[in-house]
Image (cartoon, coloured by chain):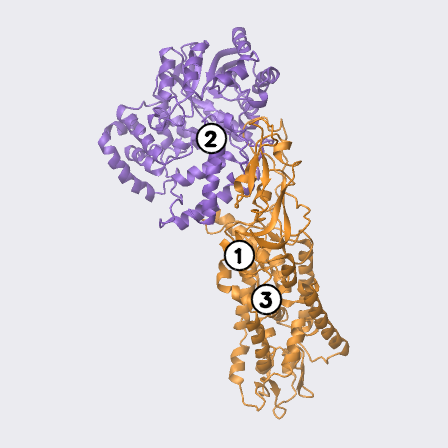
Chain colours: A orange, B purple
Amino acid sequence: MLPIICFISITLLFLDFTGTVHAYLGWVAKMQFVPAVFASNVVIALAIVFLTLLFGRFYCSMLCPLGFFQDIVSFKTSFSYKKPRKGFVILRYALLAGFIATALLGGGLVSVLEPYSAYGRIVSQIFGPIYKFGNNLLAYFSEHIGSYAFYSVDVWVKSLTSFVLAILTLVGISIFAYKSGRGYCNTICPVGTFLGLLSKYSFVKLRIDLSKCKHCDLCSKKCISSCIDTEKGKIDYTRCVTCLKCVKACPTKAISYSKPFKKSVQKEAEILSESGAHRRNIFVGSTIAALSCATKLQAGSGDGGLTELKDKKVPNRKRPIVPAGAGSFKHFHDHCLGCQLCASVCPNNVLSNKAYGSTKPNMSYERGYCRPECVKCSEVCPTGAIKPITRAEKSSIQIGCAVWNKDLCIVNTDKVACDLCSRKCPSAAIAMIPPSADAPPDAPKIPMIDTERCIGCGACEHLCPARPHSAIVVEGVEVHRVV
Amino acid sequence: MDNNNDASNSNIGRRDFIKLVGAGAALAALSGCGSKDGSAKQGKEPTGEMTYRVDPKNGNHVSLLGYGCMRYPRMPKSQDLATENNLDQEAINRSIDYAIEHGVNYFDTSPLYCKGFSEKATGIALSRHPRNKYFIATKMSNRNQHSSREASLAMYKRSFEDLKTDYIDYYLVHNVGTFEALKERYIDNGIMDFLLQERESGRIRSLGWSFHGDGEFFDYMALKYPWDFVMIQLNYFDWDMTADSKRTNVSAKHQYDLLTEHNIPIVIMEPLLGGRLAKPHYKARAAMTQLNPEASAASWAFRFAGSFPNVITVLSGMTFMEHLQDNLSTYSPLVPLNESERDMLLKVSQVMLEYRNINCTQCQYCMPCPYGLDIPEIIAHYNRCLNEGNFPDDKQSEDYKRARRAFLVGLDRKIDSVRQASRCTNCKKCVPNCPQNIKIPEEMQRIDRFVENLKMDIV
């Protein structure tokens, strides 16, 4: 049951855009190993290490969502024992070393290899949009029956890099899992390698009673890690993820999950090995291609109708903006695993990683701004890259600062009055002043930004009527400060 | 005639009225308070003969129901862009054919209606009928960028082309309500003199003026030129506005009385206040339903407007066939209101005043907003939620959570977020265009503050 709960919980964390699930299940993401290490969450990290020394790689079979995902894919596959090949063993430890090195130095490899963020990427980039399409379909129907149960949400590719990476991960892992079960976990995954090293010495582990073994090979056919050598009656504990399928498969009860002195903990093993039904995702996708073949006449000379609006374009920011709670760009970059959980929950469509092509999210204001009442990303971040903050704290943390571009402002381009940025600024950092000392009193006023009050929320940038480039743009600050 | 009997049998006294409203509120709330409450008249074929009024200036027999060409049906579009003609010509043809068949002979359009495509659509539909079967009314709508002499003359010329005619029966000086507007649009460019000459030449058969605006100006303008007719906004809500003097400083009653005193025939616009009187607040509707459960709310408003003898026609922008049929039934023939029914309606307007709707008639004169807002829809959503009881203005109320969700989710469904009130730049370009004198930017900012508080959950 536990693996199913973990898997479904984490999947829901990435799919749910309403923020309902996170209140109850947010802790599940925080139980993940690498996120816990990144968050300096000593209690969780040490607990996992301690429990691994006791029970083996329970983490890989129970807590890891990517592991369970592979088990779904390889549900029907029949395996056989594979000798540990030297090349693979070297690759394993080399990747672990590389992983630790990049984690310390800060680099993209971490988020590519780390299992939790790889799974997060797959769900948020691929399953997320499908889930949202399904939701929008329900919203469409609920609108037609006058219900407010569902509302439709924007579906968009938050980053091409991440999207492509997610597809590659999904396809790669699926093929790998279908062919060789937990091959990924035992060749590439750095967490698997690390925990494998520990589980060699674990107290409770699988043991074969050779006196009972008939060498029927049923256990190794079921073994998702291909680690049971029935000929020699040996198990490669660095690869075993304690899924206990072998225990169930063995007709003579020769394999047991037990303490060294062969006292049976069979009962526990049975409970743990109960397998649950695998749910398939049902994909309901609908794309409605709206074709316009309108006849254009005397553009907009009459009353009524809407002015066409160009989509906003991403400004070329000198410094990326990261959420309040990150403290600084460096802290964020060092601790973020790129799991996309924050981007999945952001209700304002602010977090994505399209702006500077990294696998780690950053903020941009084309589709919304960082609304003052929201601290969702800080609540869900499992690695401590975004630390928990309150609404009140957020209102005084400067994550960036607005810069006015006079050449794009409609006060100059359209010669009309506009005070939208000033009016909508939640920290009252923008004052409207006459354009020059000797300007006539009715001349349209221009914005003056108080850099000591601006917190960089992007309300001004997002709402600015200048299109496609806003006339007021937020630049990130390297170290967040309290204003 | 049964209508009349029903109504007079159930006369209610003034003192009974408040009681009825109270009792009816519960009833209306139960029945769902929408306009689809199955009023028997809706969608029913009109049976009797259309009532006609004689225009004293020229002897024309004008149907009491006039066809307003400002609210034509549109084809659904993902975005209703200002530059696209998405009028549903087939539906328009069908509707106009039906109207003519049932006696309607007055068609009122303008060069600016329906993004500027109304005259063309009207011309296409009407030219399929003999020219002597109907009267065309159109206007000199030379607002904003159209106010120069050249642009005004081009507009005048285009009306004849689009309407496929060589004379206009009723031509109006459109929506002039202040001395400044008169000077800019008609005096300085010589257009008023031009129109008076055109009347002499016969291309304009009757010259009139349509008014929304300042009371002092009304008194001046009504007598300044030799009008053949004047078009005013008249309905039971605007009739006597002593209770709500902020909206405008001149009541419909004053306008009607002054014009009648000077024997100037009247055309009525906004008898339904842009549909608001077809679906008033459910508490206001109760008294009508109690007096006659068969009659639609709209039919009461039309009977009110049509009961004034100096009115030659009452315009209605009928988007759907059901509207047309309901209105035809009301005026085929007109059953004038009796005293107690009139009193009932005037009291309904008092009830309506308690529910502070924004006084928008959805005329679209403010559109297109240069910065993309959907102003009429924003106001419509606000009013709709107010009238349907989905108005989350009190956090202590039990219904707050549901109403908040309905308001916010409904808003995002109706209006794209880039077109909501939060986008108002306060450029004030819309202000002079609003015939109802709504301070649009102020209202947008008020609605935005309300929405913002709802989102932050600090109402």
Residues marked 2 and 1 touching at CB (< 8 Å): no
First-in-chain label (1 vs 3): 3
Kindly report which numbered mark, 2 or 3, lies closer to the viewer in this rendering. Answer: 3
Name the secondary structure under disc 2: loop
Any part of residue B410 in sight = no
Q: Could you tell me how many numbered marks the image carries? A: 3
Q: Residues within 10 Å of mark 2 (few under 14, many from 20)?
A: some
Instruction: Compute the Cα span from label 2 to label 3.
Output: 53 Å
Q: Nearer the viewer, residue A121 or A368?
A: A368
Residue nearer the viewer, B103 or A435: A435
Q: Is residue B173 above or below residue A260?
A: above
Q: In x, y percent, where is residue B324?
A: 43, 28
Q: Residues within 10 Å of mark 3 (few under 14, many from 20)?
A: many
Q: Which mark is residue A39?
A: 3
Kindly identify the amino acid type of the residue bearing the numbered disc 3. Ala
Q: Which mark is residue A376?
A: 1
Q: Position of residue B112 (x, y in %)?
A: 55, 24
Residue occupying image coordinates x 51% and y 22%: B109
Q: CA distance from mark 2 to mark 1?
A: 38 Å
Q: Callout 2: residue from which chain?
A: B
Residue A324: percent from the left, percent from the top? 57, 55
Task: Give the structural element (helix, strand or loop) at label 3.
Answer: loop
Which amino acid type is marked by label 2? Lys
In the picture provided, is A296 more to the left or to the right than A264? right
Amino acid bearing label 1: Lys
Estimate how packed mark 1 is, as few (under 14), some (14 to 19) or many (20 or more) residues with alpha carbons within 10 Å.
Answer: many
In the displayed orientation, state which residue is furthest to the right. Answer: A87
* Chain bearing mark 3: A
Q: Chain of mark 1?
A: A
Circle 2 residue: B439
Question: Height in image: B108 above or below A229?
Answer: above
